[in-house]
Image: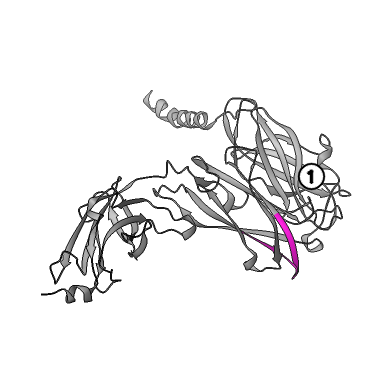
Amino acid sequence: MYKKLIFLLPAFLIAISFACNTVEEINYTYSITRVWWSDSIDTNLDRYVQSKRLNFNLHLKEGVVRTVNARIYYKPREASSFTFYAFSGEQSIKGSDVDNILFVPIGNTNKELPRGIYDFKIEVYETSGTRLETGSGSSDSTILTNQPFEESANDKNYSIHTWWSNEYDRNGNSYWQNAQLNINVDLDAELQKSVFAKLYYKLASDTVYQLYNEFNDFTIFGQDIKDTVSCLIGSANKELKFGEYDFRIELFESGSNILVAYADEAMPELNNVKFEQSDLDSYLYIISNVWWTDLLDLDNDGFTQNRKLNFKVDVDKDEQRTIYAMIYYRHPDSTDYTRYDSTSNFNIFGSSGSNNYMVEIGGLKTQLDSAKYDFLISIYEPRPDSLKIVETSISAYSDSTLAIQKFEKTEQDIKGQK
């Protein structure tokens, strides 16, 4: 009896293993509801494009989320069979029959096609499967037939290069309050051209771009980096709410509305760029204490030839910040403050007791003629001049320590000695 059980046990285990490894593949309901072309680049206007974008709207009926990778095929009009062209790349698809817009560039970032007329075909597969889920070709979409293409070498070839600079992220959470987008347009020939551009933006989760800025006519020459144009994105211009954004640049020759080049979220620099509004990217500075030390007054008349102005700057978060201060003074006969000195950058941390800094007034610095002066201290973060703002300040109006301070020159102090 026991021998029979021992003999049957391996077969039983194999049967269980086979049953556990057999998982039924669910047949979800996919459909391509629309196919269209966009972003056609034909700068010599011969109707043979060097590149354009094949777009399609993919629907999934069931209320699930699946990952797909579409395949694009092509063939010359006279050929009998299709050849694989490119993948769309893995994309997450939402169910419940919502729009899922996918696209594949034909030409440009993918393989360029020799001059000719082409047909195309779309096939959609789940990344984990080999079953064709849905597709579209010449039999059900005339949009995919008789498409003229040529290589960019036969067309005037503009290219757009972008990079970011002066990124400002005050709270250090990787979401910029503002940053400068730099755009350089190159032409494949050593020619001078007048062009204009439009800059668009959208939340990465959206499908429709909105206009952000227009660059009026500007001149480019060949591959010259000096013809770069820039735009400040975020606060101090049009502020962007917290989120990840895609950007798109469209280029036109001056006096024409025909697109000659574009760059968008397909470029890493313009894809999922993090921004937030200024009130989220904020913290507060305060000059919490001001005092004078090391007074030098040889004639004891209350007018010092020099002394040290000390101040303590705190920030309302327990984080390190780099700042600098500018010191101003006002003569009693004047209504305006005059800049006296600027400190080097220094670090503070929260409300630490070490957040102190000192500036010498008088002495080897600029000496002040005999009078009673008011002083003002302004705090800045080290940023480009165009983005510089006063973070906090304190003056004789708000703190009497800075009001009616008596100074005189060294020779006046020595001369007054008894």
Q: Which residue is mark 1?
A: 120
Q: Is residue 391 above or below residue 129?
A: below
Residue 402 lies in what quarter of the image?
Answer: bottom left
Q: Residue at x 44, y 49 (%)?
A: 174
Q: Residue at x 16, y 64 (%)?
A: 302
In the foreground, 262 or 55: 262
| Image quadrant in which the N terminus is located | top left
In the shown orientation, is residue 150 left or right of residue 412? right
In the shown orientation, is residue 150 left or right of residue 305? right
Residue 82: image x %, image y %?
A: 79, 47
Q: Is residue 27 above or below residue 191?
A: above
Residue 189: image x %, image y %?
A: 75, 68
Was residue 10 drawn as part of the magenta stretch in this picture?
A: no
Magenta-drawn segment: 183-196
Residue 267 in sight: yes
Q: Is residue 12 above or below residue 240?
A: above
Name the colouring of the figure.
one colour
Residue 138 in sight: no
| Image quadrant in which the C terminus is located | bottom left
Q: Is residue 396 above or below residue 369?
A: above
Q: Residue at x 70, y 63 (%)?
A: 219
Give amino acid for label 1. Answer: Phe
Main SS type for the magenta part? strand
